[in-house]
Every structure is written in C-alpha cells, then in structure tokens.
C-alpha cells in the first residue's frame, strides 16, 4: 500500500479507536477524545481528497484494535494508535514534497502530541529508531 493509503488506513483506525474509547472516558478525557475524533475526521477527509478519485482500500491494517477495558485501557489504546499514526505520517512526509510534506509533518506532530496527552512516551522522531 502507498504511504498515502497507509495514512488513510491509520486515520480510519484512529476513528475506530476513538469510537470504542469514547464511552469509556469521562470529563476532560471525554472532551479530549471528542476533539481527537474531530481532528481525525478532518484529516481523513483531507487525505481522501488528496487521493482524488483513486480508490484506496483503507482498512486498519496492522492495527490490532480491541475494545479497551476501562479508562486506563482506553487511554493506553489511544496513546498507541496516535503514536503509530505519527510514525505513518512521518513516512508520508518522507514520500512527498511541498505542501503535502508540510501537512504530513504537521499531522505527525499533532498525533504525537495527542499520544503524549494520553500517556504515551515522547518520541523525538516518531516511527524512527533512536539507536
């Protein structure tokens, strides 16, 4: 699958994960989850527009998403999905140029910030080994 197709699949996985987690989060976490859901909806529409009429099979390939158990499980799932999507956007940035590269890099940053907000470990270069 192309880097663009991977990004679309990752966004669809994020939408699915946020849908699963929404009912397990409360208060400020629920509000943050709704914000994340809205951000991913906007990104997937932007990516589909970028893909144009080309049919890209966007399946959550590589994402093993199961309903989380409770609030802690929901936060962990969202941190994982956001972190993995940040790496996917990093790959998309490497595969593109110009405005597409800039948008992919910004999306990677946004995903990494959300991952950290959900309790994920910060990564200087998401998706790339630090060794």
Image (cartoon, rainbow, N blue to C red):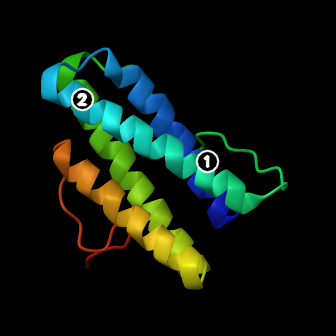
* Disc 2 target residue: 31
Q: Decide if residue 97 is on the left or right side of residue 106.
A: right
Q: Please give the label number shown on residue 55.
A: none
Label 1: few (<14), some (14–19) or many (≥20) C-alpha neighbours in 10 Å: few
Q: Do the residues labelled 2 and 1 touch (CB within 8 Å)?
A: no
Question: In the picture provided, is 131 more to the left or to the right than 64?
Answer: left
Q: Is residue 62 visible?
A: no
Q: What element carries label 1?
A: helix
Q: Quadrant of the C terminus?
A: bottom left
Location of residue 34 with respect to 53 vertically, above or below: above
130 to 83, vertically: above or below: below
Between residue 46 and residue 61, name the one nearer to us: 46
- Residue 59 screen position, x and y as percent: 65, 40
Which residue is painted at 53% across and 78% down in the image?
101
Quarter of the view holding residue 51 = bottom right
* Local secondary structure at mark 2: helix
User: For the residues marked 2 and 1, what is the alpha-carbon distance in whole angstroms?
Assistant: 22 Å
Q: How many labels does the image show?
A: 2
Which residue is labeled 1 in the image? 45
How far across and down, in percent of the image, does residue 75 sit? 23, 33
Residue at (68% x, 44% y) in the render = 58
Q: Which of marks 2 and 1 is nearer the N terminus?
A: 2
The picture quadrant where one finds residue 2 is bottom right
Height in image: 53 above or below 97? above
């Amino acid at each position: 699958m192309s880097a663009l197709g991977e990004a679309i699949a990752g966004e669809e996985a994020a939408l699915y994960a946020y849908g699963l987690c929404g009912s397990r989060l409360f208060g400020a976490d629920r509000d943050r989850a709704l914000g994340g859901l809205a951000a991913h909806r906007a990104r997937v529409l932007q990516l589909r527009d970028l893909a144009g009429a080309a049919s890209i099979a966007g399946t959550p390939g590589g994402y093993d998403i199961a309903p989380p158990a409770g609030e802690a499980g929901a936060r962990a799932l969202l941190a994982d999905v956001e972190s993995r999507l940040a790496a996917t956007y990093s790959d998309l940035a490497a595969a593109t140029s110009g405005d597409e590269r800039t948008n992919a890099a910004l999306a990677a940053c946004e995903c990494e910030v959300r991952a950290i907000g959900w309790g994920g470990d910060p990564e200087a270069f998401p998706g790339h080994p630090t060794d």
